[in-house]
Amino acid sequence: MNPFEQKPMNIEDGLMDWATVYPQPYCKQTVDPYTKVRIILMNGIEVESAIFKHQFHRNCTDNDLRRELALSRRVEQLQQKHVNWLKPIDETTLETTIGYEHVAVDLTAWLAQNEPDPYVKQALDFALLEDFDHLYRYANLLDLDDQIPAQKLVKSYVDITPGRPTIAEHRFPFDSVKRPVDFSTADIRTKLNTLIITSGEQQTMNFYMNLGNTYGTDLGRQLYLEIAMIEEQHVSHYGSLLDPKATWLENLLLHEYMECYLYYSFYQDELDPNVKSIWEMHLNQEIAQLHKAAELLKRYDNKDWQQVVGSGEFPRLLQFHDTRDYVRQVLDQQILLTADRESYSSVNDLPKGHEFFAFQNRMNHDVNRVASHAVIVQHQQLYQTDYRAESHPNPVSALTDRKVDNTEIARTANAYQTA
C-alpha cells in the first residue's frame, strides 16, 4: 500500500467529540496479548508524535507553520487518548507493565530480524536481552505481590526467563551514544525501525518515570526506579541512531509515514473488531496528516516527499509473532556483551580500568540493595524458586539455576565463558 496514492480526508475531520474519543476498553481476561501489544506501542507512537510536534513548535518562528502543527498535534493528542484509554479500569499498573515489556521483547526481536543495517541490528539485539530480563523481574514481582502468574497475561507468546541480568545493564552514560544513521542513503526499513523503537522505548521510560513511584510496596517502587534508569539508557541508545541532519520537516514527514505504516500493519492483523475499527479510523486521519506534511515539506524546504521516503510503498508490514527461538539464539550468543562507546565488547575483554566497572562499583557496590536482584531473592526465599515460564531451559547454563540469582555474569570479567 502506498499512502501517498490514497485520497486524504480533511485534517479537521479528525477532531473527535467526547463520545468518540472515549473508547470501549478491552476485557483484560479475554484480550489477546498481541492486541495489548499493539495498543501499548501505538500509545507510545502517538506520545512521540505529540512531543515531537511540541519541540518543532518551540523551534519554529513561522506562525502559519506553527498553526498547522497545532492542528495536527491536537488530532494526535486525541488519537493518543483514544488508544491509551482502551486500557480497562481493573488492569493494574503492574499488569500493564508486563504488557510493556512484552512489547519491548517481541517488537525489538521483529525489528532486528527485519533490519538491513548490521549496525542498527546489533543495537536492537543488544537491548533486546535487557528488556527480556526486565520482563522476568517484573513477572517475579507480580507473582510475589499479587500471586498472578505472568504467563496468564502473555500466554505462550513469550518466554519468561532471565536475560542479561538487569544489575549488569547499568553503564556509564558515554557508552549509550552510538553512531547516527545517514537517512539520505538509509533503507526505508532502517528509518522506520529506528523511529519506531525510539518511540516505543521512550514511552516505557515515561511510564516508569511517572507511575513507578505509585506502586504499593517499597520493593516494587525500587524495581521501577531501577529499571526506569535502564529505559533512560535505551532511549539514549536508540535515539542516537536517528539522523541529526534531517530537517524538522523531513522528520515531520517521517513521523506521519511511520504512523500510517503502523496503523495499516495493525489493521491487517487485529482480531478485536472494536480495536480494528480504531486502527482504521486513525489510519485515515494519519494519511491526511501525511499529505499535509508532504505539502509543508515542499512549501518550506522545497523538497519532494520522494526524497525522504522513496517510492512511498510500505515495506514488509510489522506483524507480531512468536520470536522465542530468535531471542534464545541472541541470548546464547550475546549474553556477555556490554556497550563500549560506539561499539560493543564482551565484558571479559574490557580493560580493568574501563568506566563500566567504575560505574558498576558506584551504583551496585551493595548487591543486596539492587532491587532487580532483591525481587528474585525474595521470591526464592518464599517459594524456594524463582518464577519462570519457559518453552525450553535457558540457553545460558549460568542462568539455569532457579534457586540462585546470578549477579556476576555480564558484569564481572571472567565470571562466565561462552563456548
Image (cartoon, rainbow, N blue to C red):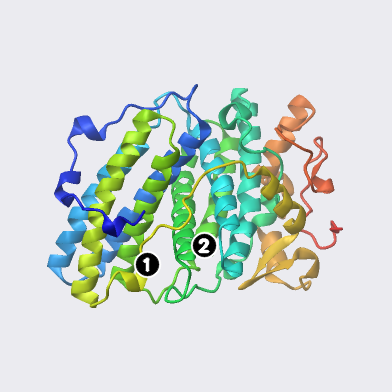
Look at the numbered disc 1 and give the secondary structure of its residue: helix
Which residue type carries mark 2?
A: Tyr
What residue lies at 28% left-to-right and 41% top-to-bottom? 281
> In terms of image quadrants, where is residue 304?
bottom left
Q: Amino acid at mark 1?
A: Val
**Res 371 → quadrant:** top right
Q: Position of residue 295 (x, y in %)?
A: 20, 66
Give the label on residue 309, or none.
Answer: 1
Q: Could you say which disc has been placed on residue 238 in the image?
A: 2
Q: Residue at x 55, y 55 (%)?
A: 111
The residue lying at 38 percent from left, 60 percent from top is 313
Q: Is residue 307 visible?
A: yes
Residue 41 is situated, as x and y percent measured from the top left of the image, at 44, 45
Q: Nearer the viewer, mark 2 or mark 1?
A: 1
Tell me the element at label 2. Answer: helix
> In the figure, 78 relative to 351: above or below?
above
